[in-house]
């Protein structure tokens, strides 16, 4: 039983899917309860994964391997390391929260929660898959439920946003598919065709540098759309803004991380040389994204759009950290992935709660809400401060590590990224000020209720984690560090003379003349 | 002493059974006034079931590679084709019966024998090992399809039949020209003979290439590949929906499998000369089919353009020109048949009576009116778009993988790019079904039988999408051609 823990975590929501899709007379409340119970159970199961995870073991743990299609070398291959561990937990943690916050959905309830549970399977599946085609299956399968969530229960321009989201991501992943199949055919020409990431790492080492670089770009585009990396981000503001609250939480909290995770897991692992080759280019895009996202967020009057653009900025930090190839920056990037999921998730939850009351997302029509709803605005302030990067709250650690780590590589990138932290303080605190303080703009707002019990249950765990991970990030870093160190070592072995094992893969084919070109 | 040629009819028993039952049906239709539909259904069912049984038994048939003086191949490739085609015909039978019963039109008894004749032509063409037999089979299936297209006698239907007939006659002429050229160049019309004659030739290939070009035009017409696709949208739209479903799935299977035999056996020695042609046809079909589908506002027309694009995907697999390519193409044909039968089945149910409601507008809010149909249609559309975990994804990955393995990665790039374009118009329909309100009055078609039938492709779409390995043994055996 315990040997299949990852499979259980991944496919536990399928139980809920089966119930919701076959029990046609289920009441709305029944559907909500089924979704909640399923997601909570999945979260509990994922805690067991955390419990069994051994930070000292290098490489992948709890690996499960089974033949899927023998002829084609397809495998069901899942496993977890220090990066994917937290991504899985982040997903399973945000899921019950998203279900709870969706309690007020009253149209097509069964179908709504069905989409959510399918989404959970797909997302968790992409985080644990170690077979490239299996990963692609999950990665692509994310699109459908998310498309329905945005298009079915979103805001006014939901259809536009949903289609845009779908096509953008699918266009990106088209390149991923070609790249994956290319690697497969390479493996087949060398012996046995396989999609096993661990074997393909060696296979990719036999490619000519130019080929590897093209493949790097193919993979990069797929993940860059998802992250999103400037200038491929334009789907994001629409999708985040039009999605229902839970959709925005999951988009920002989890889906964007699939992109960043893909960069670490596949781009860096498969194409270390090409990663170094393109590192400066990617870092420039990341810094542009950091600054651009922040500047555009400054001028937003729609609070949800503002948070959406802040995601572009924050994810820029993640990408910068990944492509700095230093231990601090890499750990910081993964920390930032977790923390951004929590803090932006919290912001979207709160924006949703404010919208449910005021029926507007326009900052110009809000004001003085602090006096009317002290608890709600208090929680908002807490999330804003976390997102800004106040020391003692979660985002600070990750951003600090990324800036420090990339400063080592290039003072320019480090300094420019630091500017964005200031901008974040401006746009987030300013928006909070416009919303919470000043005169009450709309008399109807005077009688708005404060946080309900259900909302308190939704918010409390998220806000608590903002504090916990801010004060004691060691919980995270203890498990992340070994993995990110190994990744950095794999990509930039020039920095450490000691590691001969990793270099041996690349040596016979590609003498290290390119090394350290970044 | 006169030696009588040895005649082994066992390997063509499926065709004989089909033709025999078709003739029984014809005679019944001619002499029974008025004819009873139930008798027709019974006769056709017996014919299809018998054919399926005989075909399955042929899987383990021991004997020569060919029969009837090398006219017909005996291999598992053709057995797979027969089983698949009979299954498609069975769906057409269910759909057609329902369709004509619903339209209150009792006098359509010819439908059943024609369906069997068309199927006989299709199964024969996949086994044909002589271009003359290929031509005969091509004519049998084409003539049956022309009549089937016009069978309702409605204006659109007759117009489509006429168009199909005229253009089809052209393509048949091209085919005959090709056969004549091939005979002129090699002195034989036998597929094996052509291959033998071409092996090791270094001389002037002009006439052979001309022969190939003419044959390619004819096949491109039948599989509706760009630039010979012009008939497809009009015929698909005009034909009664059950016929469209049958035509889109079965014709593709039959024509592609015959094409595989011609390319990978007859012209195998000049592979390097024909792959660029297939490459271009594939690229053009994928691009043009996907792009033109965007502009459509009728579901049947959209599916017609999508079938053009899918022809391009299958051709992509054929560029590999090896076992992997054949296997990928066969898998794609199976997958495409499943998806397209499902999708057209739903089109038939939605356009509750006749062909009145096939416009996009009649799909608005379908999820509200009929959640089951909308859900299944979504499944088929996502599969056609190649989204995992459906069979359409595995099929696409297979053909792209085969093309990349053969070094044609730019073609795979074109393929994935057109898949994205294609996703756009599939999504449009999903948007209509789920995200818009119903407009106007709609008859509901509550009948059970077609719904049960559609459940089978729906199940297979997911089952083969998640466990594609179920087919790998069969495909490995079937991808070996004998001649």
Image (cartoon, coloured by chain):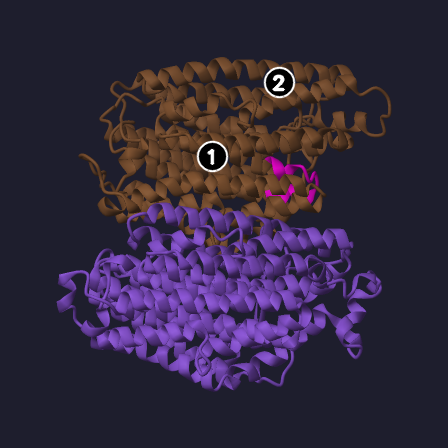
Give me the chain letter of mark 2. Answer: B
Callout 1: 10 Å neighbours few (<14), some, many (20+)? many
Q: Secondary structure at mark 1?
A: helix
Q: Residue A324 sits in which quadrant?
A: bottom right
Closest to the observer, A114 or A210: A210
| Magenta stretch, residue numbers | B315-328
* In the image, residue B30 above or below residue A369: above
Q: Residue A130 sits in which quadrant?
A: bottom right
Residue B255 drawn at (x, y percent): 56, 29
Left or right of B27 in this view: B142: right
Callout 2: 10 Å neighbours few (<14), some, many (20+)? many
Residue B440 drawn at (x, y percent): 18, 34
* In the image, residue A290 above or below residue A386: above
Q: How many numbered badges does the structure rendering display?
A: 2
Residue B389 drawn at (x, y percent): 48, 54
Residue A335 drawn at (x, y percent): 52, 75
Q: Is residue A291 magenta?
A: no
- For the colour brown, the matching chain is B
Q: Residue at x 39, y 75 (%)?
A: A385
Q: Secondary structure at mark 2?
A: helix
List the residue tagged with mark 1.
B306
Q: Indicate which disc, 1 or 2, sits on the residue closer to the N terminus.
A: 2
Colour chain A is painted in: purple
Closest to the observer, A290 or B482: A290
Q: Residue A356 sits in which quadrant?
A: bottom left
List the residue tagged with mark 2.
B175
Disc 1 from disc 2: Cα separation: 25 Å
Magenta segment main secondary structure:
helix
């Amino acid at each position: 039983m315990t040997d299949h823990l990852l499979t259980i975590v991944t496919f536990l929501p399928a139980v809920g899917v089966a119930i919701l899709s076959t029990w046609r007379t289920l009441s709305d409340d029944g559907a909500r309860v089924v979704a909640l119970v399923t997601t909570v159970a999945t979260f509990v199961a994922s805690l067991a994964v955390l419990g069994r995870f051994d930070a000292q073991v290098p490489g992948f743990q709890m690996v499960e391997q089974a033949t899927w299609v023998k002829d084609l070398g397809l495998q069901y291959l899942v496993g977890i390391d220090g990066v994917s561990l937290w991504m899985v937990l982040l997903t399973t943690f945000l899921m019950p929260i998203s279900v709870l916050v969706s309690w007020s959905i009253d149209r097509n309830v069964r179908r709504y929660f069905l989409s959510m549970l399918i989404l959970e399977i797909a997302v968790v599946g992409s985080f644990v898959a170690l077979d490239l085609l299996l990963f692609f299956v999950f990665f692509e399968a994310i699109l459908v439920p998310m498309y329905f969530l945005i298009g079915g229960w979103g805001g006014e321009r939901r259809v536009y946003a949903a289609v845009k989201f779908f096509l953008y991501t699918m266009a990106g992943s088209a390149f991923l598919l070609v790249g994956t199949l290319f690697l497969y055919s390479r493996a087949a020409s060398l012996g046995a065709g396989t999609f096993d990431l661990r074997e393909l790492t060696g296979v990719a080492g036999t490619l000519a540098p130019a080929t590897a670089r093209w493949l790097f770009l193919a993979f990069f585009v797929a993940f860059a759309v998802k992250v999103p990396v400037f200038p491929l981000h334009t789907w994001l503001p629409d999708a985040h803004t039009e999605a229902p609250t839970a959709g925005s939480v999951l988009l920002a909290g989890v889906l964007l991380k699939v992109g960043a995770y893909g960069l670490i897991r596949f781009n860096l692992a498969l194409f270390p040389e090409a990663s170094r080759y393109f590192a400066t280019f990617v870092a420039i895009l990341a810094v542009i994204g950091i600054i651009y996202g922040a500047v555009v967020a400054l001028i937003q009057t729609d609070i949800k759009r503002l948070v959406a653009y802040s995601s572009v900025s924050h994810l820029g930090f993640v990408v910068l950290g990944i492509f700095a190839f230093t231990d601090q920056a890499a750990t910081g990037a993964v920390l930032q992935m977790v923390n951004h999921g929590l803090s932006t998730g919290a912001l979207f939850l709160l924006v949703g709660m404010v919208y449910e009351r005021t029926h507007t997302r326009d900052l110009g029509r809000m004001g003085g809400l602090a006096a009317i709803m002290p608890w709600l605005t208090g929680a908002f302030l807490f999330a804003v401060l976390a997102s800004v990067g106040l020391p003692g709250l979660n985002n600070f650690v990750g951003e600090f590590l990324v800036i420090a780590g990339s400063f080592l590589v290039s003072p320019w990138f480090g300094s420019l990224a630091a500017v964005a932290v200031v901008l974040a303080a401006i746009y987030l605190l300013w928006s909070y000020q416009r919303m919470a303080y000043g005169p009450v703009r709309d008399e109807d707002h005077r009688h708005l209720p404060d946080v309900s019990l259900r909302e308190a249950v939704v918010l409390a765990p998220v806000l608590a984690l903002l504090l916990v991970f801010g004060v004691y990030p060691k919980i995270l870093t203890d498990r992340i560090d070994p993995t990110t160190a190994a990744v950095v070592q794999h990509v930039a072995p020039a920095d450490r003379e000691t590691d001969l094992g990793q270099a041996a893969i690349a040596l016979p084919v590609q003498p290290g003349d390119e090394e350290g070109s970044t | 002493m006169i030696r009588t040629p040895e005649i082994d009819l066992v390997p063509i028993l499926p065709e004989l059974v089909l033709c025999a039952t078709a003739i029984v049906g014809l005679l019944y239709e001619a002499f029974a006034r008025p004819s009873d539909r139930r008798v027709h259904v019974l006769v056709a069912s017996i014919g299809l079931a018998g054919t399926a049984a005989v075909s399955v038994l042929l899987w383990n048939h021991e004997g020569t590679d060919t029969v009837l003086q090398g006219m017909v191949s005996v291999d598992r490739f053709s057995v797979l084709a027969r089983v698949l085609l009979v299954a498609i015909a069975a769906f057409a039978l269910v759909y057609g019966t329902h369709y004509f019963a619903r339209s209150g039109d009792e006098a359509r008894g010819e439908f059943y024998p024609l369906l069997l004749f068309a199927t006989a032509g299709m199964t024969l063409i996949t086994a044909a090992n002589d271009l003359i037999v290929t031509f005969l089979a091509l004519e049998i299936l084409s003539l049956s399809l022309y009549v089937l297209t016009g069978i309702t006698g409605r204006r659109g239907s007759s117009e489509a039949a006429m168009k199909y007939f005229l253009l089809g006659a052209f393509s048949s002429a091209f085919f005959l020209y090709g056969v004549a050229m091939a005979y002129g160049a090699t002195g034989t019309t036998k597929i094996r003979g052509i291959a033998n004659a071409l092996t090791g030739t270094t001389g002037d290939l002009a006439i052979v290439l001309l022969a190939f070009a003419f044959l390619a035009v004819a096949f491109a017409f039948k599989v509706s590949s760009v630039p010979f696709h012009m008939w497809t949208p009009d015929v698909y739209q005009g034909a009664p929906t059950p016929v469209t479903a049958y035509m889109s799935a079965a014709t593709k299977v039959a024509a592609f499998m015959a094409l595989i035999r011609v390319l990978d056996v007859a012209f195998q020695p000049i592979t390097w000369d024909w792959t660029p042609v297939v490459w271009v046809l594939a690229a053009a079909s994928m691009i043009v089919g996907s792009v033109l589908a965007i502009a459509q506002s009728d579901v049947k027309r959209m599916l017609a353009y999508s079938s053009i694009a899918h022809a391009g995907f299958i051709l992509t697999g054929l560029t590999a020109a090896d076992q992997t390519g054949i296997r990928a193409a066969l898998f794609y044909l199976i997958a495409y048949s499943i998806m397209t039968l499902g999708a057209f089945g739903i089109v038939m149910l939605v356009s509750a009576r006749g062909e009145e409601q096939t416009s996009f507008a009649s799909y608005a809010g379908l999820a509200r009116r009929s959640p089951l149909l909308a859900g299944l249609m979504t499944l088929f559309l996502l599969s056609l778009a190649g989204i995992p975990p459906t069979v359409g994804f595995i099929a696409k990955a297979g053909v792209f993988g085969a093309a990349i393995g053969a070094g044609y990665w730019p073609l795979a790039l074109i393929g994935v790019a057109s898949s994205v374009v294609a996703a756009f118009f599939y999504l449009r329909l999903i948007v209509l079904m789920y995200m818009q309100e119903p407009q106007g009055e709609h008859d509901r078609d509550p009948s059970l039988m077609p719904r049960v039938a559609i459940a089978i492709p729906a199940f297979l779409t997911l089952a083969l999408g998640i466990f594609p390995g179920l087919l790998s043994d069969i495909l490995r055996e079937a991808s070996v051609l004998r001649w």
